[in-house]
Amino acid sequence: MPCKNCNSTRQQTFPCELTLAFPGKQRLNLAPVYIFQKIFVCLDCGHADVEIPAAQLEELSKGMGEFQPTGESAR
């Protein structure tokens, strides 16, 4: 499957560890969410895809509560 960004076929899967911290002063007391997964990287443009496991996705959703994203942080 070609890269979603540049259509290259030069892609590779790598093991990764992600630490996702919650944005905003009101969430400074929340512990970050740690994710150990594989990441799919385009070796031409650097575009990367990762799937967040259901358990960690639920942690992220709970931590964000009623947060409504705006601007650049909405991506």
Image (cartoon, grey):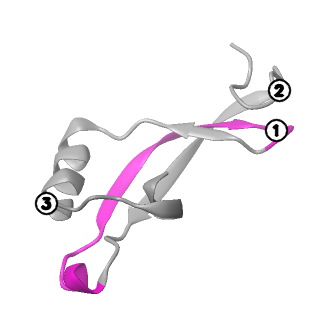
Task: Identify which amino acid the numbered label 1 is placed on.
Answer: Leu
Q: Do the residues labelled 3 and 1 touch (CB within 8 Å)?
A: no
The disc placed on residue 43 is: 1
Q: In this view, does 70 lie above or below 30?
A: above
> Disc 2 to disc 1, how far (Cα)?
6 Å
Q: Which of marks 3 and 1 is in front?
A: 3
Instruction: Name which residue lies at 25% across and 45% down.
Output: 57
Q: Find residue 32 and report its image quarter.
A: bottom left
Instruction: Name which residue lies at 44% across and 55% down.
Output: 74
Instruction: Name which residue lies at 70% across and 41% down.
Output: 47
> Disc 2 to disc 3, how far (Cα)?
38 Å
Neighbour tally class for label 3: few under 14, some 14-19, many 20 plus, Cα within 10 Å = few
Q: Which comes sooner in the sequence, label 2 or label 1?
A: 2
Residues in magenta, as a range: 25-45
Q: Which residue position holds label 2?
A: 10
Q: Which of marks 2 and 3 is in front?
A: 3
